[in-house]
Image (spheres, rainbow, N blue to C red):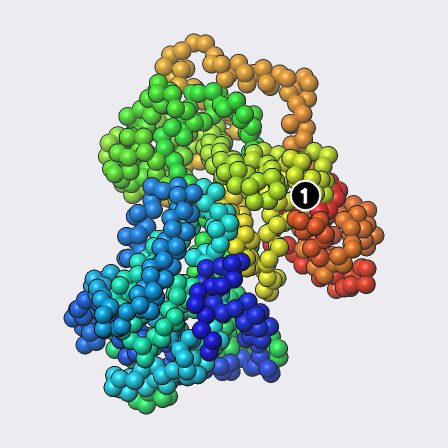
Amino acid sequence: VVLVKGNNNKEARCGAIDQPVDRAMYDRTIGCQVRTVRELKKDEVAFSVPLSAMITPDVISVSDAGQAVLQCMEGPINGDENGSKFWGSFDAMSRLEKVQMGKTVSSRGPQLLVKILQERKKVETALAKAEQMMNENDDDDLTNKLAAAKSLSYRAPYLAFLIHQRFANMENPPVGTSDLSGEMDVVETFAPYARTLPCSVCAPICWRRNELALLAGCIPGMPALQKVAAQTMQLAAELMALVDAGLLWRFPATFSPGMITWDRWVWAAAVFESRALPSSSLPSWVVSKGVSNSDVWESCGVMVPFLDMVNHENDADTQIEWNSSNSDEEEDPSTWRLKAITQEKTKKHLQIYRNYGSFDNESFMMKYGIAKMSNTADKVKIAWALVDGVGGVDPPKDYEPVSDSCDVPSSQLVFESTDADSLKAWWTEQRLAMLGKATHKNEDTLDALKKGKKITFWALNNGKIDQVLFPVAVVAALPPEKILEWHRKSGSAAPVSGRPLDGLTLDRANQITVRMYLSFFYAKKLERLLQSLNSCMKDHFNNVQLWAKASSGGLNYVAPGDGDSMAVDGESSGVVMGWQTFFDTYAYNSSMEVEDRYYAIAPDCCALTLYDGHVRSLQNTLNALANDSVFLDNVKQQLEELGCTLDNTPAVVEIKSVSQSKGGQGSSKADNESKSKKKDDKGNGNKNNRRRDKKDGRPPAIKLHIGNLSYKTLPNQLFDFFTKLYGKNSVLECHIPTERDTGNSRGFGFVTMPEQFAHAALESGRSHEMDGRILKVAKSNSAGSARGRGGGG
């Protein structure tokens, strides 16, 4: 084994080990896929792994590397109820990183980025200084300071173990040479397995500065960047504590000079995080056979060779399941095995998958260095305060409804306002009391809101409205007389039914007002998020300018008269493009297709996919607020749980503004503007309405992903190809993404077609051959937009 001190490749990420030629050899010779060599029948064993071949907490506790780390700690501390004293000196990773996270809360993105880089530099400096001391002094002259108990996580011995097994100066270094290791049924060495581990993991803790800047420059990237900073700070603190304790020179038989570097420490952390299986995902007997306490098993999990090469797929649980095979009854440890059993017939040469779990893309990215496009588990945190829901005020100057207003004038709707008088007039004691009941009398929440603080909710990718936000929106949008009416009926007594707003009747006007307020609220959140992304993206993608409004299609915006080619090729000239076009152009640059799903596998693509999940969560919720029928279907259960009754009498009930409810006689400014606007719309034909009517008349569409395109194929040729096959009006949009630097085609494109034509293309079984290639036609992960014929990128 050739020792490499640090990462000599300036272009490599933090945590990349070996030389570039070694990494290239790994990429060519070791594929991260597990495929069948023959057909497997249902209920057949796909593969099995003995317990003795797994890296468990018990293995770490008896290993030479683990014992060396333990001797660098003060203690050991007793307290393991199962009798093992090893883990008593360590603490859970989650608790220690939570402490580090508290140090990052008040920091902004650029500050966090600087902190991460400083921590990396500080550790490398400490290692260089320690190495210099080792060269200048005898081992007996070197001093050490033991690490404080509970200052190192359970992870630290694992990382030392992986480094020892991968980089020791022998082909097969033993797990342990002490009597402790002889008491367990464990393989002699894990070196062959350690050498199959990837030489780099594209997790955020390994990203370069410019890659981390994609998180630092955008508000939605801050939570992930805070986690990266906390992880880096804890990893750095642990390694420096071990250096101070003499790990580099006290155990030469285990750790030879130069073996432990910062890059290898980060590599081990990334490998451990991405490869370890949570103990909860394995049969209970795996943990019950061990001697380490359950807290350690739960925190660390288990590394299972071979199984960790199996890729993720949502429907993988239909392919394999674990079978403990009477392991609870077996007395011979050599017979304890995990067996993967097929649940359906699997053909020869097919890839076998396992389900990592239902995670949002922030979790996928932090743990595995990947992100799933069109991830239904995605969500984004949003905040709400009393100022976000105030009635009787003028709408914002740039207000444009993105949902069907049913001709309700804007003067009767609810918007946002920081005006103290308007806020006090709207949020009366009666309304606040009703809000308290709607939120189940959470006094802490009410006190926080009264002090001007915000409460947080989730916007979900499935379009569902947060269960706490919805009653808040109902109370915020009700007219004053409805608040008083409900209080007269309910009094101060708790509802007998247990439903907080029992007895509240929402007429048609109330329903529209609630829906329009939610639409306004989500639209504002989407626009602010797009504005933040626009500021960040222009610094990384040739001054690209994003459409940052929820109107005109929102994420699916297309500049009037501009095809996709202008939006992409003309990005440096300031042409505005919608998020969907931008995402299609850049996010597929480094992606992987798995069973008709796409996964981002590079930092920039992961960051874009993370943000796509955020904006799409808001957009999908807006889509669910488009009209009354969709809205009521979406919130029917929530209304029932609140105790609300719907009165759908066609008659329109007037909703008074705050000034009218207090006895004002004149119309508000918003009323006059609304009447004037209606008159203009009726007499002159408002252009926005005409555009909206035209858009509403478009047929439902499906976006198709066209793979295996010739690099010479042009967008107009692809357009003509499909129109010749399926008819003149069969193609609504055609787009071929291009390379940012060269403008060359990326070898795939998108064609949006009305549903009937799209289904024909997908289900006809027809061979689509163009320019000497058989095209791969599949339904795209991203939503289609029914717009006119456009050029490609």
Residue type at tag 1: Val
Residue at point 24%, 31% (across, down): 492
Q: Position of residue 362 (x, y in %)?
A: 45, 53
Residue found at the very far front of the displayed protein:
136
Residue at point 54%, 52% (across, down): 604
Q: Position of residue 776 (x, y in %)?
A: 71, 62
* Direction from residue 592 to residue 220 in the image, left or right: left
Residue found at the very far top of the displayed protein:
665
Q: Position of residue 753 (x, y in %)?
A: 72, 49
In the image, residue 80 above or below residue 679:
below
| Relative depth, front residue between 592 and 173 | 173
Residue 374 seen from this side = no
| Relative depth, front residue between 203 and 1 | 1
Name the residue beneath numbered marker 1.
Answer: 568
In the image, residue 15 above or below residue 430:
below
* Direction from residue 327 to residue 759 in the image, left or right: right
In the image, residue 15 above or below residue 222:
below
Q: Give SS at disc 1.
A: helix
